[in-house]
Every structure is written in C-alpha cells, then in structure tokens.
Image: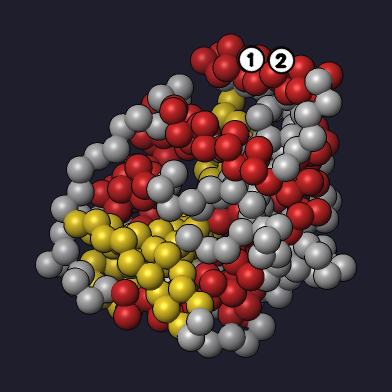
C-alpha cells in the first residue's frame, strides 16, 4: 500500500518532484559527484548541532588502510557503551561531517560513546570495500578510544545504506566471523538488493528516494556480478544469536517493506527485535530535521530508550 505523505512535507516534496522532472527534461545525467552534492544540500535542513563534552577526529590505521572516524562522548570519564555509526547515502554519498549533528544527538540521547565511521564509497570502491572498513573498525575500535572511558558493550547503528552495513556485519557473524555486536539500530535500512518487496514499487516514485535512484546506486555498488539476493541481509544467513534490534521504518519509503520483513524474520528466530514506523515520513527524514522537528526528536528519543533498555 502506498504511504500517505504528512501535510507538513507536501510543499517540500512537491518542489523536489518538480525539480526532478525538470532535470529529466534538461537531460541531466546522474553522476556520483552530482549525487554527493545533492545529498550534501540536505545539510541546510539540519541546523541544530548540540554541544557535547568530547569530540575527536581520528583514524583507524591497519596496514596501508586508514579509515577516518569521529568520536563523541557526553562524559569522557564515564565508562559508557560504544556505538559505531555508519551513515547513509546509497553506498555512494555522505560523510562524517554531514552526520555530525545526528551523531551528537544519538550520543546525548543514549548516553553512549559514538564512533562515526567514514567507510569507503562506490563507485571508486565498490562492494565489499565499505563493509570491510566497517568490520575493521568493529574489530579494532578500542584502539581509537585512548582518551575516552568506555565499557564492554558494543553496538552498531546506521541509516539506509548504513543499515545495510550493520545487517551485513550481523550476517557475517552468523556465517562464523568472530564479531561481537550487542545491539543494532536500523533507521529505514536498506536490506534487500533484489527489489523483492511491494513498497519498492508502491512508494517508488514521488517520495524523495525513488526506485530508479536505488537501482542506480546498486549498479554503482556492485561490480563483480554478485548475486544481489545472496548478499541481501533480509535473505542472508541469520540465527537466534543475532543482536537485539530496533528497526525504524517510514510509511512513504520504497524500502519500508524490506525493513519490516527483516524485523519479522528476527522475531521468528526468537531474537528481541522492536519495530516502529513513522507515518507520513519519507526516507532520509532525519536529514530534514528542520522540516520535521517533532519526528526527529521522537526518533532520537526512541534510539536512546532502546540503547538504555
């Protein structure tokens, strides 16, 4: 069933749809650079960035690989749980600077250390480069926390493609990788690379993220003729040792149904999984905070409550 857009988003989404139609008429060809520029423009709608006690930019250096990170703590002397955050952007866009306000809000709402990870992006670095970066940080994150107290609870979180990274790490764990993940937070996650669920068509046009855009992202992400279904976390290996999970979906999102299906699969396995749907919201609403402040406040509240449960 197609979602019904919240009234306070109608004008903005209408303007976006008109701009997209004009771009098609003008023959604008999508490129990674253009996609990155357009996503970065959404930062204009996230203007509130709270103060936090500790921030630090750093790098995880493993051999020739250097992965930039940014560390946040509301109380660097307290032994707090640690959450690794993987940003969204179709595996092609986004960075830790764009997600700085969100990571501050998560750290404050959840009273935890947040490590925001700048994993490598497609098409320059196709699958599984970014996922491999994420696994390296998960394995070695303690080496980054030389100036911050922390405890032994480790969690992962991400929006959209970042949710794909979280769930792909859980899939690797189910396949036998020696990884510890105590909880995962999935914000409108991308967990199906095969376009197998009805909302991909039902919500595939007119709601910010379109089915054509998702297909283009994946064409740039996969370069080795991988089986899209085999690498989709919603269909991949899972077991009852999967971490406690919070799945956030939005009703006006082509990815809605796959997030719900992932949650339902966890529940059927006996995993403690919670699901909350934001009615009337579109994909990436967290990047539109000034337009939907109440919904974003509730989002961070729910993340904090889940992490502290």
Asked if the residue at tag 2 contacts the one at tag 1, i.e. Cβ–Cβ closer than 8 Å, the answer is yes
Residue 73 horizontal/vertical position (percent): 23, 59
Residue shown at 20%/48% (left/top)? 52
Quadrant in which the C terminus appears? bottom left
The quarter of the picture where residue 45 lies is top left
Determine whether, in the image, residue 189 is placed left or right of residue 205: left
**Element on which disc 1 rests:** helix
| 249 up-or-down from 143: above or below | above
Q: Quadrant of the N terminus?
A: top right
The residue where tag 2 is placed is: 18
Eyeballing the image, is 274 above or below 286?
below
Residue 204 at x, y = what percent? 78, 34
Q: Residue at x 23, y 67 (%)?
A: 80
**Residue beneath label 1, please?**
15
- Of helix, strand and loop, which one carries label 2? helix
* Residue at the image position 83 percent from the left and 70 percent from the top: 224
Q: Residue 10: x and y, percent?
A: 60, 14
Residue 307 lies, with reference to residue 46, above or below; the image says below
**Category of crowding for the residue at label 1, using alpha-carbon neighbours closer than 10 angstroms: few (below 14), some (14–19), many (at least 20):** few
Farthest-out residue, left:
77
**Dot 2 crowding, Cα within 10 Å, few <14, some 14–19, many 20+:** few
Q: Nearer the viewer, residue 120 or 215?
A: 120
Residue 147 visible in the snapshot = yes
Query: How many angstroms separate mark 1 from mark 2 (CA)?
Result: 5 Å
- The spot of residue 289 in percent (x, y) is 43, 30
- Checking the image for residue 189, the label placed there is none
Q: How is the image coloured?
A: secondary structure
């Amino acid at each position: 069933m197609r979602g019904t857009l919240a009234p306070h988003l109608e004008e903005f989404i209408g303007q976006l749809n008109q701009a997209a139609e004009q771009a098609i008429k003008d023959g604008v060809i999508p490129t990674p650079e253009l996609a990155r520029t357009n996503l970065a423009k959404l930062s204009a709608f996230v203007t509130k960035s709270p103060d936090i006690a500790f921030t630090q930019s750093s790098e995880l250096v493993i051999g020739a690989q250097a992965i930039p990170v940014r560390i946040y703590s509301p109380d660097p002397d307290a032994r707090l749980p640690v959450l690794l955050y993987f940003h969204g952007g179709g595996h092609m866009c986004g960075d830790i600077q764009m997600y700085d306000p969100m990571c501050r809000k998560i750290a404050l709402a959840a009273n935890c250390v947040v490590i925001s990870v700048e994993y490598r992006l497609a098409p320059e670095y196709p699958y599984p480069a970014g996922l491999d970066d994420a696994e390296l940080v998960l394995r070695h994150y303690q080496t980054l926390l030389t100036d911050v107290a922390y405890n032994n609870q480790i969690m992962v979180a991400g929006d959209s493609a970042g949710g794909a990274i979280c769930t792909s790490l859980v899939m690797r764990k189910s396949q036998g990788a020696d990884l510890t993940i105590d909880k995962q937070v999935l914000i409108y996650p991308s967990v199906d690379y095969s376009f197998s669920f009805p909302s991909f068509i039902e919500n595939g046009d007119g709601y910010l993220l379109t089915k054509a855009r998702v297909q283009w992202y994946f064409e740039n992400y996969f370069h080795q003729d991988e089986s899209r279904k085999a690498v989709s976390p919603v269909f991949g290996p899972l077991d009852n040792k999967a971490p406690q999970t919070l799945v956030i979906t939005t009703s006006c999102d082509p990815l809605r149904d796959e997030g719900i299906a992932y949650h339902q699969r966890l529940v059927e396995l006996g995993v403690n999984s919670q699901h909350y749907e934001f009615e009337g919201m579109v994909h990436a609403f967290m990047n539109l905070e000034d337009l939907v402040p109440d919904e974003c406040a509730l989002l961070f509240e729910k993340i904090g409550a889940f992490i502290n449960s």
